[in-house]
Image: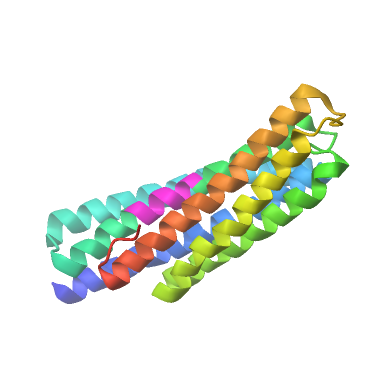
Amino acid sequence: MRDEFRADLHIVSQLLVDMAEAVRAAMRQATRALLTADRKAAETVIAQDAEVDSIYRQVEERVCDLLARQAPVASDLRAVITALHVAADLERMGDLADHVAKTALRRHPSPAVPAELRKVFTEMAGVADRMAEKIGTVLSKPDADRAAELDRDDDAMDDLHRSLFAVLLSDDWPYGVETAIDATLLGRFYERFADHAVNAGQRVVYLITGEPTA
């Protein structure tokens, strides 16, 4: 029974790695669509969001099956519950990439962000990409110290988010309310993407140490 449990848990872990890779790729493509008005990239992200949702459902089903058949306790139970929480964060990250892509598609054939905001969104996307990559790494090879780094990575995203608002709220903003609203929402999508990555990292720390994070 123990060997069977470990084999099943390994499958769940691989599904989580697959999810992390998928949401990272989704946000990269969504950003390309956003900055270059790439309609095909946006449509690809939107279509592939269903695949992320499908993996999430597979994780849910396998976790429920493990709980029913194996009745895990202690660290085993912690591993199963952690997997479910991490999957939920990754699924939400995929949804946020989908929101970015839909914003890009709505503004097509024009770029969804004006030139003045390209730099900050490029930098936000870079932080998001590094955080998603790190989540995939710590899910593949659990490392509490590396997972804890995501809190510090998120500080960079928060700084960029604040700099975005400084531009949007400046007296000489020339692009009107609609563009400002889109930019505000886009900033929120990237910021929340990072927050969910932090949540997933904290779950990994808890899995390894058994100590809840603040």
Residue drawn 33% across the image and 70% down it: 10
Residue drawn 87% across the image and 31% down it: 172
Q: Is residue 131 above or below residue 208?
A: above
Q: Residue 91 in magenta?
A: yes
Residue drawn 67% across the image and 34% down it: 184
Q: Nearer the viewer, residue 183 or 15?
A: 183
Q: Nearer the viewer, residue 69 or 103?
A: 103
Q: From which residue to which does the magenta span run?
A: 85-92
Q: Is residue 111 left or right of residue 77?
A: right
Q: Position of residue 107 (x, y in %)?
A: 78, 31
Q: Position of residue 14 (x, y in %)?
A: 41, 66
Q: Tell me the quadrant of the picture where the C terminus can be found.
A: bottom left
Task: Report if residue 49 is visible in the image.
Answer: no
Q: Is residue 4 above or below residue 128?
A: below
Q: Nearer the viewer, residue 162 or 196?
A: 162
Residue sticking out furthest to the top = 177
Q: Nearer the viewer, residue 57 or 34?
A: 34
Q: Is residue 210 left or right of residue 34?
A: left
Q: Tell me the quadrant of the picture where the N terminus can be found.
A: bottom left
Q: Position of residue 193 (x, y in %)?
A: 55, 49
- Magenta: main secondary structure equals helix
Q: Is residue 6 above or below residue 121?
A: below
Q: Position of residue 3 (x, y in %)?
A: 19, 76
Q: Residue 56 in magenta?
A: no
Residue sticking out furthest to the front = 171
Q: How many marks?
A: 0
Q: Is residue 182 above or below residue 203?
A: above
Q: Quadrant of residue 112?
A: top right
Instruction: Please say which color scheme the image uses.
Output: rainbow
Task: Report if residue 67 is visible in the image.
Answer: yes
Q: Is residue 184 left or right of residue 81?
A: right
